[in-house]
Amino acid sequence: MLLDRMGYILAEAFTLLVVISFTKAILRLRRGCDQRRFLSQRDREVFFQPIKLTAGAPMRFLRYAVIFTLVTTIGAVEIIILSPFGATIVSGALLVTCTAIVHRGLAEG
C-alpha cells in the first residue's frame, strides 16, 4: 500500500521536473534565438525589486492567509471525497474550486 503511493508520488514528481525543465529549455531557446540573456534587465527589475509595503498591507496579508487556508482545507476535503472517482475528476474539481476561491478572494471590494 505504501509502496504503491510512493510510486505515484515519484512518478508525479518526475513529471513535474520534466515539465519545468522543458519550459526552461523553451525559454532559453527563445531568448537565445534573439541573442538575449536568460534574465533581461527588465526581468531582474520585476523579480528582484524591493518590497514596498503600503498602509493596507496587513489586511492584504490577512486576506491571503484566509484564501490559503480555504484553498488548503477545501482542497483536502475534495481530495478525500472525490478520490474514488479518479485523478481526472479530482484535478478538474480542484482547478475549478481553487480558481473560484482565489478569484473571489482577490477581488477588490
Image (spheres, rainbow, N blue to C red):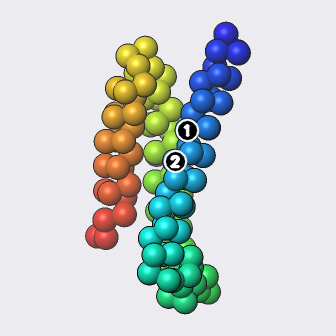
Instruction: Check the image and name the residue furthest to the right.
Output: 3
Please name the residue that numbered disc 2 is placed on.
Answer: 19
- Left or right for 8, reference 103: right
**Which residue: 39% across, 33% down?**
91
Location of residue 34 (image quadrant) = bottom left
Residue 54 visible in the snapshot: no
Query: SS for tag 2?
Result: helix
Amino acid type at circle 2 is Val
Q: In this view, does 96 lie above or below 5?
A: below
**Relative depth, front residue between 70 and 13:** 13
**Viewer-side residue, 79 vs 44:** 44
Image quadrant where residue 41 sits:
bottom right
Which is more toward the observer, 20 or 91? 20
Instruction: Describe the element under mark 1 as helix, strand or loop.
Output: helix
Where residue 60 appears, as percent x and y from the top left, is 48, 70
Check disc 1 and report the residue beneath it: 15
For the question of whether residue 68 can be seen, the reply is: yes
Badge 1 crowding class, 10 Å Cα cut-off, few under 14, some 14 to 19, many 20 or more, is: few
Residue 62: give x, y in percent of width and height: 52, 64
Left or right of 52? Residue 99 is: left
